[in-house]
Amino acid sequence: MKRTKSNSAWLLLWLVVAGGCGAAEGGGGGELTDRAVRAVATTSIVADLVREVGGDRVQVTGLMGPGVDPHLYRASEGDVRRMMDADIVFFNGLHLEGRMGELFEEMGSAGRPTVAVTDGIDPSLLLTPPEFEGAYDPHVWMDVSLWRRAVDRVAEALTELDPDHAAGYRERAEAYSSRLEELDGAVRERIAKVPPEQRVLVTAHDAFNYFGRAYGFEVRGLQGISTVAEAGTADVQELARFVAERQIPALFIETSVSARSIEAVLAAVQARGFDVRLGGNLYSDALGGPGSGAETYEGMIRTNVETIVSALLGEIE
């Protein structure tokens, strides 16, 4: 809580300074006809989306790099400065960036353009887990068909900010949406190789429920929707019992979550006499680094699907 208050105080100070310098309007200052749009995005997944729609017209700065957990992320003073210097800020929303919510509210109140990309998704399509009472599951990108709806929200926001280049935003959004439609079909085709009774996905936290609903998987996460609450011994033993009884062949580590929790489940399952193994690393709340094959959203989805299918079918050693 102390850190959040510190960030809020820094934001208010920055607003005063910016206002005194005449930069309170228009983010980074200067007419957009003379330069590119400066955008800041919170997660690497949101940053990738904004780059696809913005193209060369938009310079995107991402706050969270590969492997960063947005549930636990705390904005630094440098992050606040980058957001205040930007023309527009994009974030996932649905409380994914929980510790940054207050910052977005204050920026919006000060007239700074802040856009939750999930605002373009019909709430009736969102999951409402009972343990996340009063809020939606924010991991909507795990269902490619839902993430396509976020494309339109980004295009709409950029068009409103920079109407002179609306045609370019719409063209790139349509092209990217078509690619995502093809990606969704490719995912379904690959997953069809796994018999329905084998489609059980066990991970560190519940980031894959939209994936499960869209592609026919039963999903079990050790830590629930958010990684803020740590799993206890009872949670580990209960998940181990489930894995052993169902004879699930593989468990999966997430690159943005500590491997310790799943390794504890692995040991508990093996103690029960069932030889489960680690199926590989999945990208959940963040994209992968250079050379990972998951540097983009499309690459992340393809990499995850190949890892899941190969592990469940025993195609990897």
Image (tube, rainbow, N blue to C red):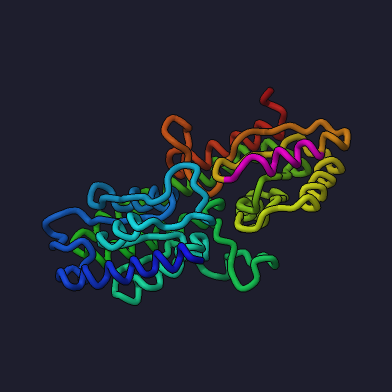
Residue appearing at x 65%, y 58% in the figure: 229
Residue appearing at x 81%, y 31% in the figure: 275
Q: Which residues are magenta?
A: 257-268
Residue appearing at x 48%, y 55% in the figure: 73
Mainly helix, strand or loop, the magenta region?
helix
Looking at the image, how many numbered discs can be counted on the residues? 0
In this rendering, the answer to whether 236 lies above or below 87 is above
Q: Residue 201: x and y, percent?
A: 70, 44
Q: Residue 59: x and y, percent?
A: 26, 50
Q: Residue 97: x and y, percent?
A: 49, 60
Residue found at the far bottom of this picture: 109
Q: Is residue 127 left or right of residue 51?
A: right
Q: Nearer the viewer, residue 186 or 305?
A: 305
Quadrant assignment, res 247: top right
In this rendering, the answer to whether 70 lies above or below 160 is above
Residue found at the far left of this picture: 34
Residue appearing at x 36%, y 50% in the figure: 62
Q: Report if residue 275 lies within the magenta region.
A: no
In this rendering, the answer to whether 296 lies above or below 135 is above
Quadrant assignment, res 264: top right
